[in-house]
Amino acid sequence: MDQKKMKIAKIIFFVYFAVITIICLVGALIPAKDNTWENGATIYYPDNGAVVGHDFMVNGNVYHKNGIDQVSLVFEPSADLFPVERETITHGNKTLLTLSTFKTPITIQKSGKYKIGVAVTSNGKTSVIDTIELTVEDGVISKVFKMFSINHLAALGVLCLIFFAMIMVYSKKPTPSKRIWIYSIVSISIILSDIVLMTGILSRGAFRGSYDMFLHMCSIGGFLTPILCFMRDSKKRDDLYNLMFLWGLGGALMALLTPEMGGYAFPSFYFFQFFIKHGMIFIAVLLVSFIDGYRPKLKKLPGVMLVSTAIVGVIYVIDRLIINIPPYEPGNYMFLSYPPTGGSAIDMLVSVFGPSPYYIIGLILLAMAIYLVLWAPFAIAGRIMKARDKNK
């Protein structure tokens, strides 16, 4: 890549980094809509103005610095009240943590237009904090994301087709210019999907300091992906490639197989954003492998795990500190505080090692196992090629 193109790529990346950083700081430190530092509530799903069936789910979060006595969803003009049970993290028969989030099933018998508000009672005082409008209609089926449904499998299939198409286009006539275009498509897809998503979350007042900042593995991986794509060949790029082999290939693969969708299903924007973002991270690592010839190295695994463990330690401390800002719960970046509430492989680690922080040991061991499983096909293919070369 010439100096001019490299300079443009650096400018784009730093603008991307700056925009995301500003959005995260504003979202975490400046309450939006009716929310304050003392209390707040936001309905994430359905969207304001949505059309739903008579049976649907309301997802959101609610918090109060002084504790919550009761939460209800208030429907107007019907004046129906639906008690809200916030999600809890349990181990055995013990509740370890009550979260700010809720997923409440709703049944409305009569069609029409409604306003939904979140009524929060704390210390005997009740206030309605957030309100959205929606329409209930006959014959509308509310869609909820299901793992390994047709839509889920179709999304994975499309990502595979995109990867193979990119490889075929490049292989037909490999040129430096074509390589740059392919890497640019991957990087710009990640950058735009991140900025649009975060801007949307911020504008809706749905930003949670405990979950929505760019501190998840795939969020950090998203930052590192453009760097990996456009970095000059060097030992540092090889080191970053091996780190991204775990974080990008392994982390994004786990996310794609067990998505945390928050109720959003096809064809919502979040559905497309999730699979574009994580899919492009996954594809980027494979492209660097097949286009640039990089390969995971077993001797790099100790260094990868050392760096990863150090980052996990820093993120865990941040998770503990975030309890001091709304919604006043521990952060769950990299899922170090509790497993995804929708279910994941981490649940098995909890059953073996126990709740956080103990299952983090299992996460580290799982990461090592994932690296080895993904490394094995490359190692086997490499040995086969060497054997063929010797027999020629």
Image (tube, rainbow, N blue to C red):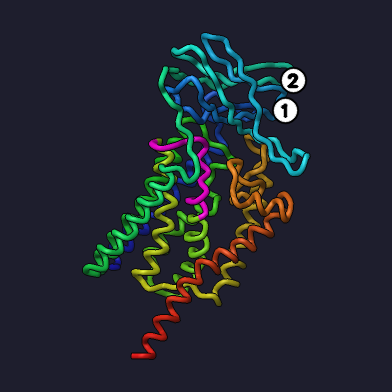
Percent across and percent down for residue 175 are 24, 69
Q: Name the residue beneath numbered marker 1.
A: 66
The dominant secondary structure in magenta is loop
Could you say which is closer to the camera, residue 278 or residue 303?
278
Q: Quadrant of residue 303?
A: bottom right
Q: Secondary structure under badge 2?
A: loop
Percent across and percent down for residue 213 are 54, 44
Percent across and percent down for residue 31 are 56, 31
Q: Secondary structure under badge 1?
A: loop
The residue sitting at 64% across, 33% down in the picture is: 100
Circle 1: is it few (<14), some (14-19), or many (20+) Cα within 10 Å?
few
Q: Name the residue beneath numbered marker 2.
A: 123
Could you say which is closer to the camera, residue 182 or residue 137?
137
Give the magenta-colored segment's residue range.
254-267
**Residue at the right extreme, as displayed:** 93
11 inside magenta stretch: no
266 inside magenta stretch: yes
Q: Is residue 89 above or below residue 304?
A: above
Could you say which is closer to the camera, residue 235 or residue 285?
285
Which amino acid type is marked by label 1?
Asn
Asked if residue 219 can be seen in this view, the reply is no
The residue sitting at 72% across, 49% down in the picture is: 355
Q: Is residue 183 above or below residue 65?
A: below
The residue sitting at 21% across, 69% down in the picture is: 173
Q: Is residue 72 above or below residue 165?
A: above
